[in-house]
């Protein structure tokens, strides 16, 4: 039996997945969502593959107990390191943030030269390089790990001078001089997009997973006949594994919601 009226589960290590949720809310206004932020274990980008798999699997099991009809891994680090295991053990549809973005990047690049910035774990995994090369083995790929971006965003320091200095350090103009497309390979990074834009050439097209993944999810629901049929019950519930002042602040501003229903749980 199809569970069309059940919510969509979406998870990240913290508030980065809200960038995806915001787009989903706009594109799919009648759907309900359960957002899971693993704030107790953030950042994932500095953790081992085994640990990322363990947390991601526990979150998926939690979301399945909440009867979600689909899970969106709104975290590039978990998408890079845990997706194969999750696909093996999770028996409901699961969408990662990497595949829709690489397809879009390949269609967009004219110079066949793509840059990727992400967490240390995502970049070290080479998940983007491998998947891009599978689709086109004639690409130049330039990658850069930006381990300080996630803590800066979680601390709400996106407009601080320190952020500009760190952008200068990571987004070396010479290193990225050949690319014409830059993938923001972390769902936190759209929150830093204005500062990132100031540090790269204006000619570079930035690919932000949020909108691309939301469009992909809409098509997926449509193609798999999973769209909600009861249109009067839209809700969003939030589950966090630890308190986070920034999460409340940002989620209310970002998602334009006055009061968020947040529950704290232990994995
Ligand atoms: N938003 C997560 C990602 O896309 C951040 C990972 C982290 O917690 O370091 O990779």
Image (spheres, helix red, strand yellow):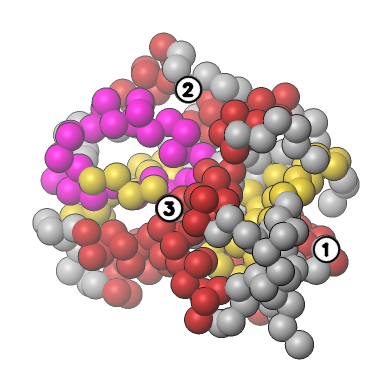
User: Distance from label 2 to label 1 (Cα)?
Assistant: 34 Å
User: Distance from label 3 to label 2 (Cα)?
Assistant: 21 Å
Which residue lies most toward the bottom here? 1
Q: Quadrant of residue 70?
A: bottom right
Q: With respect to residue 133, does 38 lie above or below?
A: above
On whether residue 132 falls in the magenta region, the answer is no
Question: In the rendered structure, are the residues bearing label 3 and label 2 in contact, judged by CB atoms less than 8 Å apart?
Answer: no
For disc 1, the marked residue is 66
For disc 3, the marked residue is 211
Specify whether 100 is left or right of 96: left
The residue shown at (29%, 74%) is 135
On whether residue 181 falls in the magenta region, the answer is yes
Residue 170: x and y, percent? Answer: 34, 31
Quarter of the image where the N terminus is located:
bottom right
**Which dot, 2 or 1, sits closer to the camera?**
1
The residue shown at (43%, 53%) is 211
Secondary element type, mark 2: loop
For disc 2, the marked residue is 158
User: Distance from label 3 to label 1 (Cα)?
Assistant: 25 Å
Q: Residues within 10 Å of mark 1 (few under 14, many from 20)?
A: some
Tally of numbered tags: 3
**Which dot, 3 or 2, sits closer to the camera?**
3
Which residue lies most toward the top here? 161
Residue 26: x and y, percent? Answer: 52, 51
Residue 115: x and y, percent? Answer: 28, 49
- Mark 2 or mark 1: whose residue is earlier in sequence: 1
| Residue nearer the viewer, 10 or 214 | 214
Residue 229: x and y, percent? Answer: 67, 73
| Residue nearer the viewer, 94 or 113 | 94
- Mark 3 or mark 1: whose residue is earlier in sequence: 1
Q: Which residues are magenta?
A: 177-204
């Amino acid at each position: 039996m199809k569970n069309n009226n059940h919510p969509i589960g979406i998870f990240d290590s913290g508030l980065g997945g809200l960038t995806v949720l915001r787009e989903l809310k706009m594109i799919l206004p009648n759907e309900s969502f359960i957002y899971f932020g693993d704030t107790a274990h953030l950042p994932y980008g500095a953790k081992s593959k085994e640990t990322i798999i363990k947390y991601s699997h526990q979150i998926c099991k939690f979301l399945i107990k909440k009867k979600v009809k689909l899970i969106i891994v709104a975290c590039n680090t978990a998408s890079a390191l845990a997706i194969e295991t999750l696909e093996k053990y999770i028996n409901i549809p699961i969408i990662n943030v990497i595949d829709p973005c690489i397809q879009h990047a390949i269609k967009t690049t004219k110079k066949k030269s793509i840059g990727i910035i992400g967490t240390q774990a995502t970049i070290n995994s080479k998940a983007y390089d491998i998947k891009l090369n599978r689709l086109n083995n004639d690409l130049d790929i330039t990658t850069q790990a930006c381990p300080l971006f996630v803590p800066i965003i979680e601390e709400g320091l996106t407009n601080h001078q320190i952020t500009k200095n760190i952008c200068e350090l990571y987004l070396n103009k010479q290193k990225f001089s050949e690319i014409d497309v830059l993938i923001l390979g972390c769902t936190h990074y759209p929150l830093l997009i204005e500062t990132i834009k100031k540090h790269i050439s204006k000619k570079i097209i930035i690919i932000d997973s949020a909108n691309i993944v939301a469009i992909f999810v809409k098509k997926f629901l449509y193609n798999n006949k999973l769209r909600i049929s009861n249109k009067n019950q839209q809700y969003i519930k939030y589950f966090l594994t630890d308190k986070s002042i920034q999460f409340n602040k940002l989620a209310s501003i970002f998602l334009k919601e006055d009061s968020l229903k947040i529950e704290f749980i232990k994995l």
